[in-house]
Amino acid sequence: MTDPISDYLTRLRNAVRANHRVVEIPASNLKKEITKILFDKGYILNYKFEDVKNHQGVIKVALKYDPLSKRSAITSLERVSKPGLRKYSPADAVPSVLNGLGIAVLSTSKGVMTDKEAKKNNVGGEVLCYVY
């Protein structure tokens, strides 16, 4: 596997399309930070980090659905920066997703954060993905 972030997003996307309640994803520190952001912004219901002996562990993500319409809170997950073509954004040109209705996840020198947090902290970085 050459791109673990794309694998993470694809597993979430496939689980949403199959209407699964829980999805297991191999863990890494970057994936854990992205999961925390998705939880804080209300795109997922809950998450749990399980450490396996002598391994990195897994992330169990409980997906969030509307109780009446059964539609997922995640409409789209889009990878922006790829291993073959990295996309960086300076602090003054951090992208806005759907005029602020979605989030862009950035990897900055101050950690992984959303586009709004990056603008507030006046930092730029690598644009990992768009979520809406």
Image (cartoon, grey):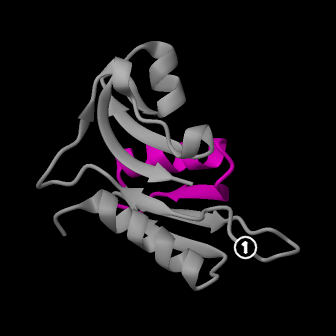
Q: Which residue type carries mark 1?
A: Arg
Q: Quadrant of residue 91?
A: top left
Residue 103 seen in this snapshot: yes
Residue 82: where, in percent of width, then height? 21, 54
The image shows residue 114, relative to residue 41, as above or below, that is above
Residue 38 or residue 88, whichever sits in front: 88
Question: Could one spot residue 55 in this view of the protein?
Answer: no
| Residue that badge 1 annotates | 71
From the image, which quarter does the N terminus lie in?
A: bottom left
Tell me the crowding category of disc 1: few under 14, some 14 to 19, or many 20 or more residues within 10 angstroms, Cα based.
Answer: some
Magenta segment boundaries in residue numbering: 28-53
Residue, far right: 68
Residue 52 on the magenta span: yes
| Residue at 59% over, 57% down | 48
Quadrant location of the C terminus in the rendered image: bottom right
In the image, residue 92 sits, relative to residue 67, either above or below, namely above
Q: Does the magenta stretch include residue 94?
A: no
* In this view, 82 is above or below 71: above
Q: Nearer the viewer, residue 12 or 27?
A: 12
Instruction: Look at the numbered disc 1 and give the secondary structure of its residue.
Output: loop
Give the residue displayed 32% in from the left and 57% down from the top.
Answer: 5
Seen at 35% across and 52% down, the residue is 28
